[in-house]
Amino acid sequence: MTAPAAAAPADAAGNWVERVAPAFARPYLRLARLDRPIGSWLLLIPCWWSVALAARTLRADGLSPDFPAALAYIVLFALGAVAMRGAGCTWNDILDRDIDGKVERTRSRPLPSGQVSLIAAFAFLAMQALVGLLVLLCLPRFAQVTALSSLGIVAVYPLMKRVIWIPQAVLGLCFSWGALMGFAALMQALPPAALLLYAGSILWVIGYDTIYAHQDRADDEVVGVKSSARLFAQATRPWLAGFYAGAALLIAAAVAAAGGGIFAYAGAALFAAHLAWQVARLDIDDPALCLKLFRSNRDAGLVLFAGFVLQALVG
């Protein structure tokens, strides 16, 4: 019996996987969401924030950061983010394979469409987890323990949409964990700046994933899946403004706790301005715009990272 043809989701059509990847590999690359790298960026960016802000904290304390080590961690976190985001998406699709088949945007995913078997999906999950483990073994012991502490949250996140009305909050706990990792690796400690950065990132994730969830609001209602988009509905804009304002304030507080600095504050201000632009532009009934605003958070995060890097370099 011939396997079903590999079809790309509507919001991933025309990407590099469709253009250049071998046909046999495409379903697995889609399972890991390598056709949509925005998720890897959003998982990675808090890690990069953390490395740069940890370096700034050390300089503010009169210590000299190990910049070669910091650069190595930036590379390692990039590899780890791609591997673990892929593993997380694979695990999510394994648990959601029945729900995904009932939702227009997700029914062409590899598992519900039959392009990948359940056994093959588990094997692929194990391969990606192994890559993550190899990255983990390159980190200091304190960072290893910090990273492993997130696994329980990561494992239960895909189930939360069946249980609570804001599963985005649990996603925030998962996707923001990197805000702790740079401090854990470079300082082998979690000072107040790390905890404030983590809290700010959680609110940022809740905000941008609420925007993303509005693409599926109607389908989620039909299949009974909970989300902040359904909960907030037409009141999303003020809620989004609140989450983003909280994120901006907590990140500014993290900068202050790390020793401040004009470049770090400038990055935080530009980040806040970008979030305000998203709130102003939001139209929850325009799925294409929601996707565009969601994706724009990569640029917002990189602007903040640039401010942190400059501050770490100049002291």
Image (cartoon, rainbow, N blue to C red):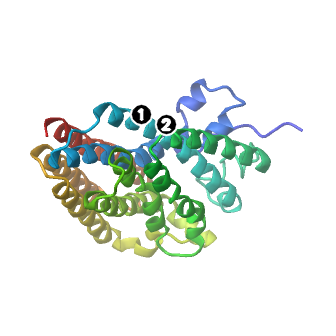
Q: Residue furthest right?
A: 1
Disc 2 residue type? Leu
Badge 1 amino acid:
Val
Residue 26 sits above or below residue 166 on the image:
above
Q: Secondary structure at mark 2?
A: helix
> Which residue sits furthest left?
262
On the image, numbered disc 1 is attached to which residue? 75
Badge 1 density bin: few <14, some 14–19, many ≥20, Cα 10 Å: some
Total labels drawn:
2
**Residue 102 appears left or right of 69:** right
User: What's the CA distance linking mark 1 and mark 2?
Assistant: 6 Å
Identified at 44% across, 70% down, the residue is 228
| In the image, residue 3 above or below residue 207 | above
The residue indicated by pointer 2 is: 79
Q: Is residue 305 above or below residue 216?
A: above
Q: Quadrant of residue 176?
A: bottom left
In the figure, is residue 11 to the left or right of 63? right
Q: Is residue 246 left or right of residue 30?
A: left
Disc 2 residue crowd, few under 14, some 14–19, many 20+, Cα 10 Å: some
For the residue labelled by badge 1, is the local secondary structure a helix, a strand or a loop? Answer: helix
Q: Nearer the viewer, residue 85 or 98?
A: 85
Badge 1 vs badge 2, beta-carbon distance below 8 Å = yes
Q: Is residue 188 visible?
A: yes
Picture coordinates of residue 201 (x, y %)? 34, 58
Give the image location of residue 224, x and y in percent: 60, 73
Q: Which mark is residue 34?
A: none
Picture coordinates of residue 123, whole percent (x, y) = 73, 44
Work out which quarter of the rendered image holds the C terminus and state it.
top left
